[in-house]
C-alpha cells in the first residue's frame, strides 16, 4: 500500500518520463487553482493529492503491457483522472478524454495546453455521440455502473483492448452482478492506494448478447 504523500510521489516518479514529475507538480498547482473556481475534487483531498489522485491513477500503468498499441480512451475524465494524469506521465501515448460537462471540458483543454501535451485531446460530448474508433486501452473512473459502462463503450474495443476500471470497494460486487461471460473477461486487482479498493482489469470485446 502507498501510505504517504512521499511514497505516492516516488511511485509516480518511477512511472514518468524525464520531465514527468515536473509536469505533475505543475498539474497539482493548476488543479488547486481551478478547484477554487469549480468543484473538481473535494477540497480535503488536495492535501493528499499525490496519494488520492495522482498515484491512484498512475497505478493503472502497471496493468498495460508494453506492446499495447492504439489510443488510450478515458471516459468521463472530469477533473482529469485518470486520463490527463496518465497523459502527463506518458506524453508519447495518444490519449482521448471524453467529457460532456462544458466547464470540465474547458478545464481539461486549458490544462492540456499548460502542460504541453499535444498527444492528448478532449472530446466534449456524451459518449453516445462520439464516433467509434479502436482503442488500445479503455479507462473510466466513477463514470457509470459496470453494465451501463460496457454497453456504452464496447464499440470502441477490439480483442486486444485492455480495460482498466477503478471501482473502489464495489469492484467485486459489480463484477459478480454481471453475466458469466463478463465475469470471465475481468478480474479484480487490489488498489495500491485504497485498502479494500479494487480495479477491474480485462481484455477483449465484452459479450453483451
Image: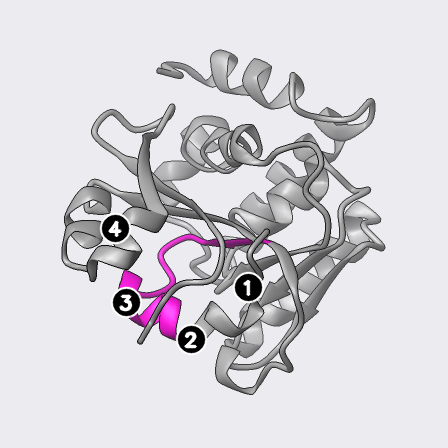
Q: Which residue sits at x=49%, y=12%?
A: 7
Q: Quadrant of the C terminus?
A: bottom left
Report the magenta residues as a range: 137-151
Q: Are marks 2 and 4 in contact (CB under 8 Å)?
A: no
Closest to the observer: 64 or 129?
64
User: Which coloring applies here?
Assistant: one colour
Secondary element under disc 4, as helix, strand or loop, is helix
Query: Disc 2 versus disc 3: distance between alpha carbons?
Result: 9 Å
Q: Is residue 186 left or right of residue 47?
A: left
> What crowding class fits label 4: few (fewer than 14 Cα within 10 Å), some (14-19), or many (20 or more)?
some
Secondary structure under tag 1 reads: loop
Task: Give the camera-side residue of 134 and 61.
Answer: 134
Q: Kindly identify which residue carries mark 3.
A: 147
Disc 1: which residue:
157
Density class for disc 2 (Cα within 10 Å; few <14, some 14-19, many ≥20) is few
Task: Tell me the element at label 2.
Answer: helix
Q: List the residue tagged with mark 4.
A: 183
Vertical comparison of 36 with 49: above or below: below
Q: Nearer the viewer, mark 4 or mark 3?
A: 4
Q: Earlier in the sequence, mark 3 or mark 1?
A: 3
Q: Residue at x 50, y 61 (%)?
A: 78
Of residues 181 and 147, the one nearer the viewer is 181
Mark sitting earlier along the chain (2/1):
2
For marks 2 and 4 on the same chain, the one whose residue lies earlier in the sequence: 2
Q: Are marks 1 and 4 in contact (CB under 8 Å)?
A: no
| Residue tagged 2 | 152
Magenta-drawn stretch contains 170: no
Amino acid at each position: 500500500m502507498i501510505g504517504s504523500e512521499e511514497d505516492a510521489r516516488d511511485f509516480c516518479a518511477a512511472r514518468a518520463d524525464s520531465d514527468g514529475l515536473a509536469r505533475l507538480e505543475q498539474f497539482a498547482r493548476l488543479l488547486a487553482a481551478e478547484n477554487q473556481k469549480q468543484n473538481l475534487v473535494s477540497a480535503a483531498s488536495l492535501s493528499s493529492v499525490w496519494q488520492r489522485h495522482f498515484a491512484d491513477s498512475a497505478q493503472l500503468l502497471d496493468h498495460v503491457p508494453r506492446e499495447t498499441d492504439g489510443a488510450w480512451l478515458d471516459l468521463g475524465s472530469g477533473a482529469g483522472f485518470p486520463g490527463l494524469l496518465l497523459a502527463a506521465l506518458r506524453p508519447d501515448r495518444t490519449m482521448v478524454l471524453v467529457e460532456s460537462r462544458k466547464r470540465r471540458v474547458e478545464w481539461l483543454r486549458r490544462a492540456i495546453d499548460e502542460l504541453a501535451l499535444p498527444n492528448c485531446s478532449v472530446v466534449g460530448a456524451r459518449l453516445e455521440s462520439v464516433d467509434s474508433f479502436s482503442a488500445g486501452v479503455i479507462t473510466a473512473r466513477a463514470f457509470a455502473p459496470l453494465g451501463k459502462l460496457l454497453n456504452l463503450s464496447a464499440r470502441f474495443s477490439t480483442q486486444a483492448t485492455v480495460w482498466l476500471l477503478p471501482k473502489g470497494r464495489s469492484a467485486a460486487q459489480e463484477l459478480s452482478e454481471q453475466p458469466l461471460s463478463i465475469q470471465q473477461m475481468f478480474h479484480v486487482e487490489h488498489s495500491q492506494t485504497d485498502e479494500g479498493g479494487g480495479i477491474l482489469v480485462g481484455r477483449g470485446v465484452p459479450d453483451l448478447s
